[in-house]
């Protein structure tokens, strides 16, 4: 049977050898096929649809590939399959431990299916995020994972127009129709606020990263404000400190200065909620420097449950986020979409309130 030829006059599987046209010393796909004792079409299936190759044949082709040191050219494979076997990820930053854990889990799952992952950072700037996403699309990625939906609407219009699969991770805006794998940011801080209220705290301070162009932080703050409002309470303006820049550099010094300013106020807060564990570390350091007993005089909470949270003294009360699960599920969803199926995004994942020694009953006075 004669193989169907492409526009260049070559059999599709032969196109994979294009990258070696200038050097006969490099092994070709045909060399791999000969060494494995199979057809070039079988080698192509081994690369593009490995599930269609028997375990015995898979082992023979793999042994031949390793013996010859053959590396297929990704661009040539794209010409044949019309897929790049690459996906893009846009995250705000890789300085945040939870973000790079999510990316690692995402990449691990994608790698099992032969996909490469290209990662770009927006620096919490929607315009830069849009530029990075368009750059990834221009390079032919098969899908995009976007941490948060803080992007110009033009990006989503482009994705729908191109029919490019995408998914939002970590959390989407309230009422968003975009597919999302994440958790309810509002509910997470609602539960944390209710916990502090159950301990008798009515004067609560907030130390957060900027909420500008950050729907996740906006939702968390709303969770605090709404929960307090239902009890007839509110955060005093002097008890709220947010960073003025998008940069994550300087979080600990900022948190220390913020807590120092709050403790100088009268009345001072009896509990301080921080937007992440790093800010909470700064709050704990400042309380210790000021001779404030935690949790006897002041309770402090974080968010993320970083590795250091359980090792602090006192150990930090925080919210545990399923970062690895988010990354893996986002990859599984996109793999289904790339395959042409229409999966339903997973339900919002649960977070867990971890109660540790940094919180206790509200003191009578401070």
Image: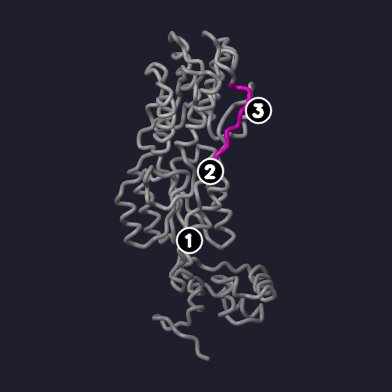
Q: What residue is pinned by disc 3?
A: 311
Instruction: Determine crowd level at label 3: few under 14, some 14-19, many 20+ residues with C-alpha closer than 10 A.
Output: few
* Residue at 59% over, 75% down: 52
Q: Kindly report which numbered mark, 2 or 3, lies closer to the viewer in this rendering.
A: 3
Colouring method of the image: one colour
Image position, residue 257 (x, y; %): 46, 17
Which dot marks residue 343? Answer: 1
Q: Kindly report which numbered mark, 3 or 1, lies closer to the viewer in this rendering.
A: 1
Q: CA distance from mark 2 to mark 3?
A: 21 Å
Q: Is residue 355 magenta?
A: yes
- Give whichever of 10, 295 is nearer the camera: 295
| Residue 53 to residue 111: above or below | below
| Residue 1 to residue 195: above or below | below
Q: CA distance from mark 2 to mark 1?
A: 25 Å
Magenta residues?
351-359
- Give whichever of 27, 99 is nearer the camera: 99
Q: CA distance from mark 3 to mark 1?
A: 40 Å
Q: Quadrant of residue 59?
A: bottom right
- Give whichever of 308, 94 is nearer the camera: 308
Instruction: Determine crowd level at label 2: few under 14, some 14-19, many 20+ residues with C-alpha closer than 10 A.
Output: some
Q: Which numbered disc, 2 or 3, marks the residue that appears first in the sequence?
A: 2
Left or right placement of residue 69 versus residue 274 in this view: right
Secondary element under disc 3, as helix, strand or loop, is helix
Q: Are marks 2 and 3 in contact (CB under 8 Å)?
A: no
Q: Is residue 12 magenta?
A: no
Image position, residue 28 (x, y; %): 56, 75
Q: What residue is pinned by disc 2?
A: 100
Left or right placement of residue 281 versus residue 344 in this view: right
């Amino acid at each position: 049977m004669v193989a169907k030829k492409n526009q260049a006059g070559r059999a599709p599987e032969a196109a994979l050898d294009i990258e070696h046209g200038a050097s006969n010393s490099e092994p070709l796909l045909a060399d791999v096929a000969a060494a494995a004792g199979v057809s070039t079409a079988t080698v192509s299936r081994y690369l593009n649809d490995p599930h269609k190759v028997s375990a015995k044949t898979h082992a023979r082709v793999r042994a031949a590939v390793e013996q010859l040191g053959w590396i297929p050219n990704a661009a040539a494979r794209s010409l044949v399959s019309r897929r790049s076997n690459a996906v893009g990820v846009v995250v705000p930053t890789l300085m945040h431990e939870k973000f790079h854990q999510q990316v690692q889990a995402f990449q691990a799952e994608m790698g099992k299916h032969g996909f490469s992952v290209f990662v770009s950072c927006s620096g919490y700037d929607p315009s830069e995020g849009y530029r990075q996403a368009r750059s990834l699309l221009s390079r032919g990625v098969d899908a995009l994972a976007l941490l948060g939906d803080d992007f110009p609407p033009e990006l989503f219009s482009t994705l729908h127009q191109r029919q490019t699969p995408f998914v939002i991770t970590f959390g989407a805006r309230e009422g968003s129709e975009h597919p999302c794998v994440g958790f309810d940011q509002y509910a997470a801080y609602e539960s944390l606020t209710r916990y502090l209220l159950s301990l008798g705290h009515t004067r609560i301070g907030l130390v957060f990263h900027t909420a500008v162009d950050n729907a996740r932080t906006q939702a968390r703050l709303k969770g605090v404000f709404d929960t307090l409002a239902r009890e007839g309470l509110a955060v005093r303006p002097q008890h709220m400190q947010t960073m003025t820049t998008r940069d994550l550099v300087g979080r600990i010094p900022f948190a220390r200065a913020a807590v120092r300013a709050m403790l100088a106020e009268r009345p001072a807060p009896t509990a301080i909620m921080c937007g992440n564990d790093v800010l909470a570390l700064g709050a704990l350091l400042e309380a210790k420097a000021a001779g404030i007993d935690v949790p006897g005089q002041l309770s402090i909470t974080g968010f993320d449950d970083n590795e250091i949270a359980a090792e602090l003294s006192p150990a930090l009360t925080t919210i545990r986020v399923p970062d690895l699960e988010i990354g893996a599920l986002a990859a599984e969803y996109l793999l289904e979409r790339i395959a042409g199926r229409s999966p339903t995004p997973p339900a919002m994942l649960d977070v867990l309130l971890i109660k540790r020694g940094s919180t206790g009953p509200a003191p009578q006075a401070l």
